[in-house]
């Protein structure tokens, strides 16, 4: 019975992870961000026609706005649509599903590397209640899928050290992780390089001599399509806009033109310094325990990626991880993940992006767990019960804190960042006169994906009526067509003079359609969609062409 | 090797005092300390009740609203902001985040960033540092005290403790990993040229 206790605890922790990610899934965060809607609609389009919104058959990477989306997540949504329909819940389901599965996977990975059950169980618990991991498990984020397959590949790799044929499986999982999110395109090769250096004897031994090259060749073959797209001009253009080495380096003193300018503003110095500053910021307690991500969508209000109470255990666990050589392969793996994971994030200029550094959540959770377990071990046995009760109270407090931040405050204060309101707009438009055309303003937003998503617009008709670039230039030309035709709905910037003379519905945010404009042009305010905090999100108005003709006739008789 | 070690020590430890001297900031240290509690985390803020009430009103269950949004949490958040800034290595080697401040970052780099290698090494060899535990506790106690108010420039108090850790890291690395030490030292010398030049130029435009 005693040997089942860790598994029972793991089951309970997985259920806890399930609850923290499943509660109000699809409803909180309130709204559906444009990338989520685009992925959902493209999955729908693939399901219905075998082509994406641009008419491309089964793309290797999906063209999306001025960017490319990785394919794994979109193809995972496809089989879910017949089951759950095209809803925010469906779109967020793969992220949730793999987020929950990551918890037991992490436990088994740690156990595989011979850590005591206590460390593995506490680590699974830390991941189950981790605000960082929960956030990405409650919305459509490809990074979450990539993390799961990265861990699965690592698990398969370690299993393959004893059972060589599993190298084939490891290769397949590494390829899926590589293709699932941009950051893994840097992380996976670096991890593989470290693994090769560490385990080259085993990999080149007679037992592995057949499977190692076979796995390598299979992996490269599976990667060929992705690699071919990665060197396309469109893809490279996107990559170059993000990385710090193509920008004016931070700290450049533009006013200094003196004789030492080549040293004062030396690019090699400034870029190296910026890279190290960004890299180190991913270990910063200030970012991990207080500030968090600057992007409102990738951070919960008033909650950092880790709880404040974890800070002392982070410091102590870090120290223990560095000095405890007896942790063996686990120490190597966690240090490797810890040191490699911030690389993709550190070469992009954004400060502390939790999405690009998501794999760090694994070693950091492990570090906190190690700190907790080692602290518990140094406590006198007399006080251990008290410590356990205290720990239980802290976990309950953390869960309540999560609820407060991820559900209550997030819905109220972050709805605009999640593009809240388009479902309500579409629902309202469906009740209005179907003969009248609709213009939806896109001067400050890209709502066409949400309109396609919530109207479940016929993908074949959309592909026929809209053109962006020839299919031969799908991966190379990132030119955009700002006007989208979705049946009677046109998504384009409102042009007031001609638009007011047509009898039609206009939809826009509070800046595009102000109260003053409505009154001055005698338009009818059909509906005002408000954010949960009561501020106006979108307004639907009916134009008044009769009035316009009358006043224009007076001005230009 | 001895000369190289002396150069490394000088380059590592000279930047913070030099920057303070160049900016005449040392004159403000006494003044800052004297006014320390005027800028305390307990100082009243007219906006605080509005922020607290706005958040509290969102909760259906008022107990949670009160638990997470009250005067104590407001003060505690100010403390955390200061405390985590003081325990952030980026504060000491990079003046926080490179693009955190829109204009040129006027926050001082306290140590050359290449020297950041010595600090983790010092912690790796923490057991060999005499009175290491005392120094570590002293660091967090001072950081906690400084975090009770705006720590700007008063964080110079932490310099001796950090200097001891850096010296320990330099000493241990030179003895245990001499090749790595030489490599770091060469990089430190090369990167210190623009870094020290900037300390002069940046402050005397």
Image (spheres, helix red, strand yellow):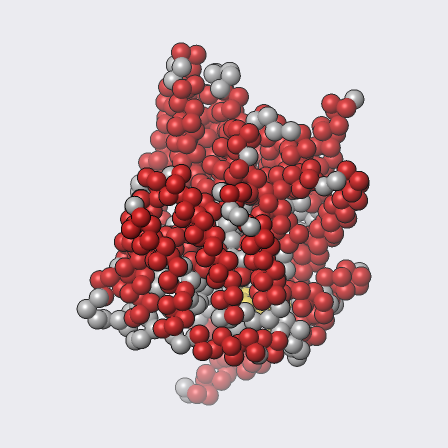
The location of residue B191, given as percent across then percent down, is 30, 55
The location of residue A273, given as percent across then percent down, is 36, 55
Camera-side residue of A61 and A102: A102
The location of residue B71, given as percent across then percent down, is 72, 70
Q: Is residue A374 left or right of residue B193?
A: right
Residue furthest left as drawn: A259
Q: Residue at x 42, y 58 (%)?
A: B93
Camera-side residue of A238 and B190: B190
Quarter of image, res B74? bottom right
Residue furthest top as drawn: A206
A175 versus A500 height, above or below: above
Camera-side residue of A281 and A55: A281
Q: Residue at x 62, y 76 (%)?
A: B37
Q: How many numbered marks, from 0 up?
A: 0
Q: Residue at x 46, y 21 (%)?
A: A167
The location of residue A125, given as percent across then percent down, is 67, 39
A75 versus A408 height, above or below: above
- Which image quadrant: the C terminus of chain B? bottom left
Residue A385 is at least partly visible in this image: yes
Residue A448 is at least partly visible in this image: no
- Which image quadrant: the N terminus of chain B? top left
Q: Is residue A550 left or right of residue A252?
A: right
Q: Is residue A323 left or right of residue B10?
A: right
Q: Residue at x 58, y 67 (%)?
A: B146
């Amino acid at each position: 019975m005693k040997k089942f206790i860790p598994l029972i605890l793991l089951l309970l922790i997985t259920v806890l992870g399930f609850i923290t990610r499943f509660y109000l899934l699809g409803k909180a965060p309130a709204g559906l961000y444009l990338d989520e809607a685009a992925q959902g609609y493209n999955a729908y389009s693939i399901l219905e026609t075998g082509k994406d919104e641009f008419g491309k058959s089964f793309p290797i990477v999906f063209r999306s706005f001025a960017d490319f989306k990785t394919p794994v997540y979109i193809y995972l949504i496809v089989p879910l649509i017949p089951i759950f329909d095209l809803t925010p819940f469906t779109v967020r389901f793969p992220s949730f599903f793999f987020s929950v599965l990551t918890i037991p996977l992490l436990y088994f990975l740690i156990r595989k590397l011979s850590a005591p059950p206590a460390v593995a169980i506490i680590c699974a618990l830390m991941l189950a209640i981790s605000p960082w991991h929960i956030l990405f498990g409650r919305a459509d984020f490809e990074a979450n899928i990539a993390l799961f397959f990265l861990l699965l590949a690592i698990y398969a790799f370690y299993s393959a050290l004893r059972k060589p044929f599993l190298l084939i499986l490891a290769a397949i999982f590494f390829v899926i992780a590589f293709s699932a999110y941009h950051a893994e395109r840097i992380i996976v090769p670096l991890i593989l390089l470290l693994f090769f250096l560490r385990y080259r004897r085993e990999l080149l031994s007679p037992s592995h001599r057949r499977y190692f090259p076979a796995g390598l060749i299979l992996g490269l073959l599976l990667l060929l399509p992705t690699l071919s797209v990665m060197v396309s001009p469109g893809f490279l253009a996107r990559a170059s806009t993000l990385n710090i080495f193509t920008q004016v380096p931070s700290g450049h003193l533009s006013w200094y033109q003196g004789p030492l300018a080549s040293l004062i503003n030396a690019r090699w110095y400034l870029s190296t310094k910026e890279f190290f500053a960004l890299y180190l910021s991913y270990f910063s307690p200030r970012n991990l325990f207080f500030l968090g991500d600057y992007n409102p969508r990738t951070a919960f209000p008033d909650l950092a990626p880790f709880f404040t109470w974890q800070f002392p255990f982070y410091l102590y666990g870090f120290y223990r991880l560095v000095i405890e050589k007896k942790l063996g392969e686990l120490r190597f793996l966690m240090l490797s993940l810890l040191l490699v994971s911030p690389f993709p994030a550190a070469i992009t200029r954004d400060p502390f992006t939790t999405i690009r550094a998501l794999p760090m959540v694994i070693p950091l959770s492990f570090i906190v767990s190690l700190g907790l377990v080692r602290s518990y071990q140094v406590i006198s046995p007399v006080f251990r019960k008290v410590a356990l009760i205290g720990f239980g109270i802290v976990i309950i407090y953390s869960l309540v804190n999560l609820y407060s931040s991820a559900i209550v405050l997030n819905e109220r204060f972050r709805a605009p960042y999640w593009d809240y309101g388009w479902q309500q707009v579409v629902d309202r438009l469906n009740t209005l006169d179907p003969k009248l055309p609709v213009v939806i303003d896109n001067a400050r937003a890209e709502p066409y994906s949400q309109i396609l998503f919530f109207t479940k617009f016929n993908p074949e008709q959309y592909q026929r009526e809209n053109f962006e670039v020839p299919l031969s230039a799908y991966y190379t030309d990132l030119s955009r067509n700002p006007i989208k035709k979705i049946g009677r709905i046109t998504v384009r910037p409102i042009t007031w003079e001609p638009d007011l003379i047509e009898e039609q519905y206009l939809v826009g945010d509070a800046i595009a359609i102000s109260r003053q404009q409505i009154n001055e042009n005698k338009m009818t305010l059909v509906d005002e969609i408000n954010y949960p905090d009561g501020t106006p999100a979108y307004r639907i108005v009916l134009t008044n062409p009769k009035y316009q003709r009358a006043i224009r006739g007076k001005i230009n008789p | 090797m001895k000369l190289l070690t002396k150069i490394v020590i000088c380059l590592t430890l000279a930047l913070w005092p030099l920057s303070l001297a160049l900016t005449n900031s040392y004159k403000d240290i006494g003044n800052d300390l004297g006014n320390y509690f005027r800028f305390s985390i307990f100082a009243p803020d007219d906006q605080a009740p509005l922020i607290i009430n706005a958040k509290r009103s969102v909760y259906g269950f008022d107990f949670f609203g009160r638990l997470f949004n009250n005067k104590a949490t407001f003060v505690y958040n100010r403390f955390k902001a200061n405390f985590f800034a003081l325990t952030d290595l980026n504060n000491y080697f990079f003046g926080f985040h490179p693009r955190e401040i829109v204009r040129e970052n006027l926050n001082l780099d306290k140590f050359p960033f290449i020297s950041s290698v010595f600090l983790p090494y010092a912690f790796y060899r923490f057991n060999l540092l005499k009175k290491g535990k005392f120094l570590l506790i002293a660091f967090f106690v001072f950081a906690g005290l400084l975090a009770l108010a705006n720590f700007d420039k008063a964080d110079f108090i932490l310099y001796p403790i950090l200097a001891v850790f850096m010296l320990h890291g330099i000493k241990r690395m030179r003895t245990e990993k001499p090749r790595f030490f030489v490599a770091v030292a060469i990089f430190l010398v090369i990167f210190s040229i623009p870094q020290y030049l900037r300390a002069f130029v940046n402050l005397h435009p």
